């Protein structure tokens, strides 16, 4: 039973503390759209998406209105397109045409983003994988709502360094192709290690091949709720702090579970998972960095930051996992720079560097996220950053990712304004020493010894 106090408490979290359901994401399998004919494949992809997701946006808005819970985004994820286009795409331009079909379908059903323009190359690239990766700059420049991801490593297989080297070049080309928008295309491209099959968050969402024909995944968010709860316990010891975060994460995740089950029922689509990540926005009071500072740090990036983030991430998972029948995706705390005003402030005041952010990714949900760097950063340096982050994920058996934006024509200290949930950010400096010879070796970094579980 829900009592009147819980109703009041939830209402307060929504109205005053920026609580929202960040996304309802419908995952759609396109495996039955595979054809040797490119035009036939395009038609089948469009028809499948527009039929399955026809009512997704309307249902999301209905639930938001009826329950008074903000649902910020409605999104779609699809089977990695390198698999779907393998039989019909002979050129990079053929894959671009599939991206444009996905974009048209996304606009038809009215979703904010569609993820799954993706390739999974943790052990090696097929010809289809490489063609899709080569097509990414043009695909992201010629579409509005399509998001792309590439998984270059895993704990089980190691890291494909040929793909890592190629993606450094692809990120630079994507930046160049979208330079008139401050290289915005790179904000729609994520490079993963240990990518999950059921992630509802963009830009890294795709519908894994082990998933069913369609599924509903929900991503919740509530940094402001956690921060407010901690404000009422200033000076408390760490055990008390952990209990507060766990209880708050439980309440936030219950809201996500409610929305997920209701959306599943109304759309006649199986419920998949709730992703209980703390995903910040540029709004004041909706910041993961401010939570860390509420724990006692003068600024995020100060000594103790990684420990504070580890405590936060673990407590969120412990609280949230008891509130849903199925928790998945990424789940924990995101630390994107441009989307978190507290992170932006820390960078501008010199408290937070890329190196410190990398250390923090050892204990957070994802990795180096929404970081703007100088446009003249060498492709090999970007590849080195990807390799470092993938190594953290591989060795620690966790998901890590890189979403960096080399902004063409801008340098350290200048500002970039993306708007909306993508926010704004200062250009951050990168290490000026070269890793070109290291990246050029090619081949594969083998899986770690603890990957052998059989």
Image (cartoon, rainbow, N blue to C red):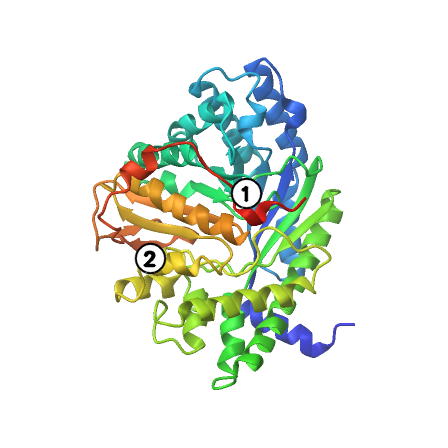
Mark 1, other Cα within 10 Å: few <14 / some 14–19 / many ≥20? many
Q: Position of residue 316 (x, y in %)?
A: 58, 66
Task: Answer few, some or many: residues within 10 Å of disc 2's Cα (few below 14, many 20 plus, some between 14 and 19).
Answer: few
The picture quadrant where one finds residue 21 is bottom right
Residue displayed at 31% across by 40% down: 183
- First-in-chain label (1 vs 2): 1
| Residue nearest the viewer, comparing 303 with 297 | 303
The residue lying furthest to the front in this view is 449
Q: Residue most toward the bottom?
A: 235
Q: Secondary structure at mark 1?
A: loop
The residue at 40%/72% (across/down) is: 304
Q: Nearer the viewer, residue 67 or 88?
A: 88
Quarter of the image with the N terminus in it: bottom right
| Mark 2, secondary structure of its residue | helix
- Above-or-below relation of 206 to 315: above
Q: Would residue 379 be visible to someone looking at this image?
A: no
x then y, percent, for residue 277: 55, 58
Give the quadrant of the C terminus: top right
Foreground of the two, 184 or 362: 362
Query: Is residue 75 among the parts visible in the rendering?
Result: yes
Circles 1 and 2: CB distance less than 8 Å? no
Q: Residue at x 37, y 34 (%)?
A: 165
Q: Residue 368's x, y, as percent?
A: 40, 52
Which residue corresponds to mark 1? 205
Residue 355 numbered tag:
2
301, above or below 75, in the image: below
């Amino acid at each position: 039973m829900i009592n009147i106090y819980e109703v009041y408490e939830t209402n307060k979290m929504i109205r005053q503390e920026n609580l929202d359901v960040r996304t309802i994401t419908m995952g759609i399998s396109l495996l039955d759209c595979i054809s040797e004919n490119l035009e036939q494949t395009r038609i089948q992809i469009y028809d499948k998406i527009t039929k399955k997701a026809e009512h997704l946006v309307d249902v999301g808005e209905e639930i938001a209105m009826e329950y008074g819970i903000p649902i910020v985004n409605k999104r779609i994820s699809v089977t990695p397109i390198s698999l779907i286009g393998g039989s019909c795409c002979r050129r990079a331009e053929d894959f671009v045409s599939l991206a444009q079909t996905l974009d048209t379908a996304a606009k038809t059903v009215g979703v904010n983003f569609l993820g799954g323009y993706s390739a999974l190359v943790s052990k090696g690239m097929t010809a289809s994988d490489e063609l899709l990766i080569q097509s990414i700059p043009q695909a992201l420049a010629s579409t509005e709502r399509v998001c792309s991801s590439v998984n270059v490593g895993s704990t089980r297989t190691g890291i494909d360094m040929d793909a890592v080297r190629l993606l450094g070049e692809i990120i630079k080309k994507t930046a160049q192709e979208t330079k008139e928008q401050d290289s915005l295309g790179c904000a729609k491209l994520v490079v993963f290690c240990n990518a999950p099959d059921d992630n509802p968050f963009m830009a890294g969402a795709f519908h894994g091949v082990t998933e069913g024909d369609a599924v509903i995944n929900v991503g919740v968010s509530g940094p402001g709720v956690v921060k407010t709860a901690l404000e009422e316990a200033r000076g408390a010891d760490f055990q008390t702090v952990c209990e507060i975060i766990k209880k708050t994460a439980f309440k936030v995740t219950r809201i996500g579970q409610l929305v997920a089950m209701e959306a599943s029922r109304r759309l006649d689509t199986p419920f998949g998972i709730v992703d209980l990540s703390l995903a910040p926005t540029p709004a004041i009071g909706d910041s993961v960095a401010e939570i860390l500072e509420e724990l006692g740090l003068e600024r995020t990036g100060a000594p103790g930051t990684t420990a504070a983030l580890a405590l936060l991430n673990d407590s969120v998972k412990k609280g949230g996992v008891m509130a849903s029948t199925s928790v998945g995706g990424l789940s924990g705390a995101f630390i994107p720079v441009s989307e978190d005003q507290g992170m932006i402030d820390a960078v501008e005041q010199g408290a937070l560097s890329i190196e410190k952010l990398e250390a923090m990714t050892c204990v957070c949900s994802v990795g180096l996220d929404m970081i703007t760097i100088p446009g003249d950063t060498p492709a090999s340096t970007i590849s080195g950053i990807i390799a470092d982050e993938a190594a953290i994920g591989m060795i620690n058996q966790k998901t890590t990712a890189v979403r960096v934006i080399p902004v063409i024509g801008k340098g350290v200290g200048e500002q970039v304004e993306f708007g909306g949930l993508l926010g704004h950010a200062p250009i951050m400096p990168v290490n000026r020493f070269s890793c070109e010879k290291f990246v050029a070796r090619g081949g594969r970094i083998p899986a770690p010894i603890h990957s052998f579980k059989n």
